[in-house]
Amino acid sequence: MNNPVANMSAAKKSAAVIDWPVFILSGGFLMLFVATALFDIELLSATVNSAFGSATTLFGAYWQVLMLLTFLVALVVAISDSGKARLGNLDAPDISTYKWVAIIMCTLLAGGGVFWAAAEPMAHFIASPPLFGVESATPEAVYPALAQSYMHWGFLSWSILGSLTAMIFMYLHYDKGLPLKPRILLYPVFGERVLHGWFGAFIDAACVVAVVSGTVGPIGFLGLQVSFGLSELFGVTNNYSTQLLIILGLIAIYTVSAVSGVTRGIQILSSFNIGLSIVLISFILVFGPTAFIFDSFIQSVGVLITEFIPMASYRADTGWVNGWTVFFWGWFIGYGPLMAMFIARISRGRSIRQLIITLSLIAPLVTYFWFTIVGGTGIAFELANPGVISGPYAASGMPAALLAITQQLPWGFLISVLFLVLTTIFVATTGDSMTYTVSMVMTGTDDPPTALRVFWGIMMGVLAAILISIGSGGVSALQSFIVVTAVPVSLILMPSLWNAPRIAKIMALEQGHIK
């Protein structure tokens, strides 16, 4: 086939039936992972850590280049005439802009956006990244610490989650009728061969395993973190029973949301989460270190822009970069295909330019401000009283850092409770969207059967519950494994660098935006 993209009009949408090879490959692997964890967690951890080390060593530099090129290519497409093309075979969006942005922010930022927002700036403040060469835990370390956090949660990470790949999914599925599966990202390369057989099934399964690993991890850690928070705030016993009850409640929330669909539960949950975030942001701006927050935000963004390419391409200290930057890049790459599928599902009727600018520029800037609100406030308290935040963080990790920050604020108890609620809903919004998207992969349609959504919702929660029953090591191993799965997923994403601009041009020509 000379030009697969140009010769797809005869393709038909797949029926809403389960793709059993994908189901067996992905579900079977996850069951094997859990069984191994229950049998010998030390063996599993050692194996995963070894694979993790190999993945970051061999593919770290490639991932850094892939992330940077994805962002730059997306910007070029956005500002070109191709950016005017409408996506999803609709003339106007079927979801309001506010709800659309709310779903994107909540789904992609997830629960990590709360705990990491508190912990990562503090981590870089007390141990300054090697690129900057400044003394740690000093006023000079503030802006590099925030800028480094921005790099990990900003332009590049948001871009890889759908700026190029979402438009490929939308064109091939909604315009050309191909099944909505990760494998169609390689359709322009392999043609019909990728649509059938075990090759395509392996591609889909690898992407499912990656995103389930990345979702089960936060579900499990939420149980651990909220249990810790309830113990600190209310004196609730911090044990497995408490953690299990939290996970069961979370399963119920996100499964019901996923079952009700994109236009109901997922929208409602995301809108509520954004509303609560705005309330907490406003409170901290009024009662927290307001001037410090704004000054730090402006100057840290300046540091990011000035040092953007050096930070994105930094390789001098491979131990540091593999433990931080490459770890995050592997994480986001692993999420990439299925996040892009979900974005494709909710973005019909948007222009390519609107999609890319929102995803690659606006959402990161909002994330930067959020990290400054939470993490910057923690740094301000630490500067004023050394050890007040870094001490709990060093002793008990991310949940302790968050609680230490919130308890320094007026009405600290109430604010701490609200942040725990916010974190729970953040994880729920990722759980419902990924439950929905994994179910889409199993059928190739954008409206998977309810029973399938229920199955995957419960499945991810049960996996988390089983893994935390053997301690945090089980969940940590699964979270680290997403970086391993990023190896094949990154190869699946690479062709989008040239296929997405080509498809964008085809859409613009078909719609009359280019003559």
Image (cartoon, helix red, strand yellow):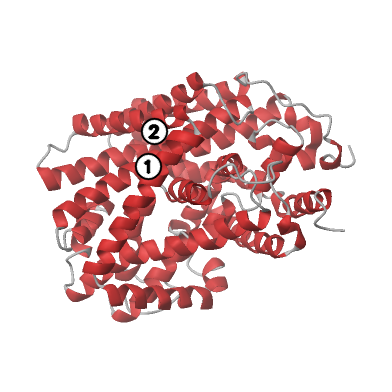
Foreground residue among 246 and 415: 415
Residue occupying the point 58% across, 35% down: 206
Q: Quadrant of residue 239?
A: top left
Residue matched to label 2? 254
Query: Which-is-in-front pick, marks 2 and 1?
Result: 2
Query: Up-down: is 35 above or below 238?
Result: above
Q: Which numbered tag is attached to residue 96?
A: none
Confirm or deny contact between disc 2 and disc 1 (CB under 8 A).
yes
Say what amino acid the circle numbered 2 marks: Tyr
Q: Which numbered tag is attached to residue 427?
A: 1
Residue 101 spot, x, y in % from top left: 50, 51
Residue occupying the point 90% across, 41% down: 2
Say what amino acid the circle numbered 1 marks: Val
470 with respect to 237 (left or right): right
Label 2 and label 1: CA atoms lie apart by 9 Å
Foreground residue among 488 and 254: 254
Let me know if residue 39 appears in the view: yes
Q: Quadrant of residue 354?
A: bottom right
Query: Up-down: is 377 above or below 474?
Result: below
Mark 1 burial class by Cα count in 10 Å: few <14, some 14-19, many 20+: many
**Mark 2 or mark 1: whose residue is earlier in sequence:** 2
Foreground residue among 377 and 151: 377
Residue 417 spot, x, y in % from top left: 20, 48
Identity of the residue furthest to the right in this view = 2
Q: Quadrant of residue 371?
A: bottom left
Which quarter of the rendered picture does the N terminus lie within?
A: top right
Residue 299 spot, x, y in % from top left: 41, 78
